[in-house]
Amino acid sequence: MLIFVFYRANAEYIRMADTIVDVPGSSNNHNYANVTLIVELARLHGVQAVWAGWGHASENPLLPDTLAQSNPPIKFIGPSGPPMRALGDKIGSTIIAQTAGVPCIAWNGQNVKANYDKHSGQLPEEAYQRATVKSVAEATKAAAQVGFPIMIKASEGGGGKGIRMVAHAEGVPDAYRQVCGEVPGSPIFIMKLSSNSRHLEVQLLADEYGDAIALNGRDCSVQRRHQKIIEEGPPIAAKPEIWEEMERAAISLAKAVGYANAGTVEYLYSESTEKFYFLELNPRLQVEHPVTEMITGVNLPAAQLQVAMGIPLRHIPEIRELYGRSRFEEEGVPTAIDFENEKRVEPRGHCIAVRITAENAEAGFKPTSGGIQELNFRSTPNVWGYFSMDSSGSIHEFADSQFGHLFANGPDREQARRNMALALKELSIRGDISTTVDYISKLMELDEYVDNEIHTGWLDGLIKSGSVQMGAKSNKKNNSNDATSRSNDSRASPHAAVVIGTTVKAYEKSLSGERQFVDALKKGQLPATGLLSMSQKVELILDNVKYRLQCDRIGPNTFSIKVLNEEGLQGPPGHVVTHVRVLSDGGYLIAKGEKSHVAYLISKGDAASGMRLSLNGATVNFSPDYDPSSLRTDVAGKLVKKLVCDGTHLNKGQPYGEIEVMKMFMPLRVEESGTITWNVNEGASLAAGDLLAKLELDNPDNVATPIVFCDALLVNGWVTKGDNTDMKSRPNLLLRKALEKLRVGVSGFLLDEVGLESALCEFEDAIKNPLLPVLEVEEKLSVLRGRIDGELFSQLGNIISVFKVQYEKSRDTISR
């Protein structure tokens, strides 16, 4: 097996290849979508067949055409060029579908019909041009005719790229230009937005001899930005008789163009009217194909390979079993199957799939990029999953945001949902990226999802309204025995999260200062003052509350945390003492007394994004300081276009630029009204936190700021208001404590006047106590119990007891 790879990602599957060929980095036009490069490398290495998977060049008809023209020909594991060209193009496939009588939703080319040429894979050019929108003016006119809300789509787009929803006429120009920019050179069309509809799709498999079958299908209605996030099968939203009609229409469409291999026909389905509309046909394998495999038992990549080898559908063992036949006939010649009239066996339960993406769900599912330090997931009999990389990999800014997929099955939908919810809670991912795991875990507990009352706009509506709150209580319908509604006792309170975050931040800064100090000395340089500072001021914002704290390092691994008021002075009495220990995997064990928490620093934070902490398995996001006058990007990408020039006045919420992030164009909007001045040029590569522009605010005094916290920290069992008086009854322990205080003070850790006086007083009280030598001897003898002669040990104990009694009598006499 030969694999072409982009090494920067360090993907997991690379290790499975027999031969690895490195390809150029940057965007996919330089590697995985570069047909010329793929064909040249395939020829150079004597490849017999090419499987392109999904995305990139998998839907480019030039790839199978060019491979077929090689000498010797190279087999493409997928449809041939002509049907791919016809059905992979959204405009062309819609014209073919409506010509064949398949229901289609209203769009700008709804009156165009034409005959398809199977040999060339072409429609008449005149018909195709009539269905294409070529300018902003045409888009505005077509949108008015179709009726708002509309979808502006690139015919060659996919995966959420090259698609925009527009609700009003004034939004058409910007949306049209964004779609053109995301898929350069692609024809554009406009279709009616079907609100509150289901996204149902039929899985097709066809051979080279004219047979085509439907392998059930999937419900992909849970989407954000028109890109799937949860898929499940079999679809139960449509009635069985309607679903069968949808399958027959999909098969007829495939046969009409001579389609062979795997493909997916997508529909929009209205539950209220029980009508379905053709959306598009994907001439490739879908990333969610294991959903179909789990409910049908058919291995789709294996079936693709067998079809490409020229094996008829009726000869494929898993297809035979799907239609109630034995895997192989005893005579060796499989009997024919009447695919049109024979029914498949019933689905094997239900399957739910969740895409694991590198996106920040709390920021509207914005893509993120960076390295991964930990990825911990184990498949079970009920949940299977895969990830494109392990804990040594990274998500780069040119990649798709999806890097994993989980699939949970069960005898019915509810059990599959429960299995998935439990798997999401046990999945642990830690790194520079944000993920949607916690958000989707909460999403699957909502009443609407449990009751299967969802549609394509459901998730986008939740994101816009902020209805899914991280850390919120579980679904009211779930009882206490449900795995999805179990209380998370390990979740720290807000004050505890702030204390732990402060400890981690102060400890990280202290270690960094020590390293810089030592490095300067090694180079013969004079270290900068302040590198070994034992007192640091830390500001953290959590839930719109700003905590101003002073964190004093009073020992190698011990910190004292006090609250400061708005003037930066000592706040309420009391302080919190924490002990920190670095774990072998880079985490931190924060302890105080009997309580302890495990924390991992996900992101240190910058001007655009605050610090992120993984605390007991849950993610805690600290907000950055709100400064609307500094326009920054919180994700890595490229500035593709300035929408306004210097000196332009912008209203609150108005877009001022566009950034390309992980194959998508995302608008940048101002959060307050003001006048803009740019700091970067178009085409600039950006890192998270980079300053794009400055905004001179119209009303700077009206900008909302977080509330400053000035009360005592309510951390259960952690607040210290004085010394532990129990130690005074045991002078040996008191002496040890005092010596330790003095030792760390001499070592350079913080010991103020009050602490020094307290340590000296404790030291004096301990050494003046007549019981000190007795208790020291008793402590040392305790380890010898059972190891020396029992009578001798008993005598020593009696002597110590007599000494104690005499001491108590003398102390009572003195007190009287």
Image (cartoon, helix red, strand yellow):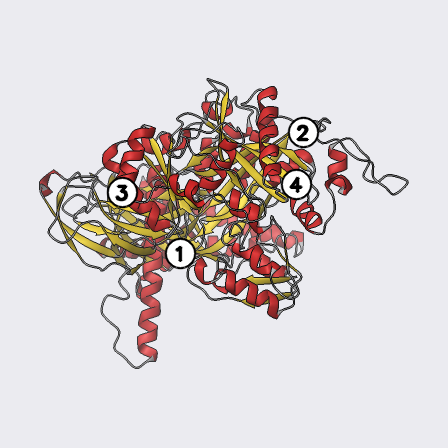
Report how far apart the C-alphas of labels 2 and 3 lie in the structure. 47 Å
- Please identify the residue farthest to the bottom as the structure is shown: 524
The residue labelled by disc 3 is 136
Q: Quadrant of residue 789?
A: bottom right
Q: Nearer the viewer, mark 3 or mark 1?
A: 3
The 10 Å Cα crowd at callout 4, few under 14, some 14 to 19, many 20 or more, is many
Residue 778 seen in this snapshot: no
Which amino acid type is marked by label 3? Val
Closer to the chain start, of discs 1 and 4, is 4
The residue labelled by disc 4 is 206
**Secondary structure of the residue carrying numbered label 4:** strand
Residue 476 seen in this snapshot: yes
Comparing 62 with 510, the one in front is: 62
The residue labelled by disc 1 is 397
Q: Position of residue 585 (x, y in %)?
A: 50, 56
Q: Nearer the viewer, mark 1 or mark 4?
A: 4
Report how far apart the C-alphas of labels 3 and 1 lie in the structure. 30 Å
Q: Position of residue 571 (x, y in %)?
A: 20, 43
Report how far apart the C-alphas of labels 1 and 4 lie in the structure. 37 Å
Which amino acid type is marked by label 2? Pro
Q: Nearer the viewer, mark 2 or mark 4?
A: 4
The residue labelled by disc 2 is 347
Report how far apart the C-alphas of labels 4 and 3 lie in the structure. 40 Å
Q: Nearer the viewer, mark 1 or mark 2?
A: 2
**Secondary structure of the residue carrying numbered label 1:** loop
Closer to the chain start, of discs 3 and 1, is 3
Question: Which image quarter holds the C terminus?
Answer: top left
